[in-house]
Amino acid sequence: MAAAGTRSPLFSRHTPGGIFSIESTLLTLGNYWYVDSGAAGKGTTSAFGYQPDTPFSTLVAAWDSGNLAAGDIVLVAAGHTETVSAAAGMDCDTAGVRVIGLGTGDQRPTITLNTDALADIDIDAANITFENLVFVANFLDIAAAIDVNADGFTARKCEFRDTSTILNALIWILGATAATSDRITVDQCEFYAVGAANTHAISLPGTSDRCRITDNFIVGFFETAAIGAAGAVTLIQVLRNFIQNTDTDADACISLAASSTGIVAYNSVGAALAGDATTNINASTGVVLIENYSVDTGDRQGVLDPVAT
């Protein structure tokens, strides 16, 4: 049940960092925790976080407090800002926690990765969810911004963006090389990746099972593929994504390794590959392809990719 002194989730309250407006859909039998870098009464010790008036000052402090437990919801105030400046600079190591950003547009909480090319957020416990957060890459060629090392990670309605062509994340969401990142869900997110050396928005190098990549908007330069699975993934769903890749390589939008299984359907993609617009999606014979449309650069209409047979 909610911790002693924790407010009911059904309230709206002004705080220095913005407006908390919690809906009944956020009901849980776990505890509610609060994070707000702009609050006057903020702190980093385990004594904070119970109330919006005395929140944790950072998400890092919330994860490190030892207070979080499965079923808990962490509410991050509108206008919150935070930096991650080292490898494992944020270690999400408590299973079943949902982190929800409050606010819309530019008021959404923003987490900036900087200072070190190895700066990243580690997902080291199962069933962790990020919602309505903005992630910004602000250092040269950050290797992998969110490193997923556990099952059931979800990113929903989040935004991922590079600062410039040289302040960028090579990979935004990286699955594990072994079978330890099953059921990754990336849903209704936006990726704006302008780094000149980027390889993926989402990379699944291992044998992940039942991952879902749905309803995302992905635009930028991806040297390998915007959505790529170098490992033989199983029962993957890649559905209704809009992808523009400014790279000129084939298979640059969606590329799944041989022996993969699943469904790739209703995606609309485009790349800067001249001539043949039917080579922006690549999948194995074990993957069902339904009504995916592809286009090259220029003012022209998309065609089925791969070609209909």
Image: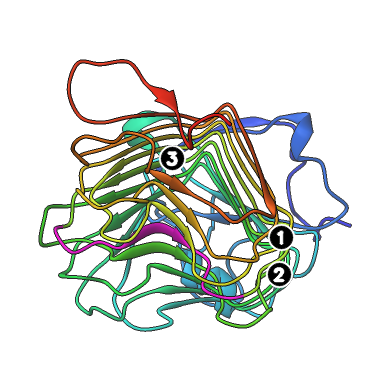
Residue type indicated by callout 1: Arg
Residue at left offset 20%, top offset 70%: 141
In-front residue for pair 159/16? 159
Q: Nearer the viewer, mark 3 or mark 2?
A: 2
Mark 1 vs mark 2, CA separation in Å = 6 Å
Name the residue tied to disc 2.
Answer: 151
Please give the range of residues in magenta: 196-206
Find residue 262 and report its horizontal and vertical position in percent.
Answer: 70, 51
Residue at x 20%, y 29% (from the top left corner):
297
Element under label 3?
loop
Question: Would you say 164 lies left or right of 67 here?
Answer: left
Q: Is residue 235 above or below residue 114?
A: above
Q: Amino acid at mark 3?
A: Ala
Residue nearest the observer in this picture, 126 or 178: 178
Is residue 202 shown in magenta?
A: yes
- Residue 103 position within the rendered picture, expressed as x and y whole percent measured from the top left: 46, 33
Residue behind mark 3: 78
Return the residue at label 1.
183
Provide residue 57's location: percent of width, then percent of height.
44, 63
Question: Residue 59, relative to residue 38: is it above or below?
Answer: below
- Nearer-N-terminus badge (1/2): 2
Disc 1 + disc 2, Cβ < 8 Å: yes
Mark 1: few/some/many CA within 10 Å (<14, 14-19, 20+): many
Quadrant the C terminus occupies: top right
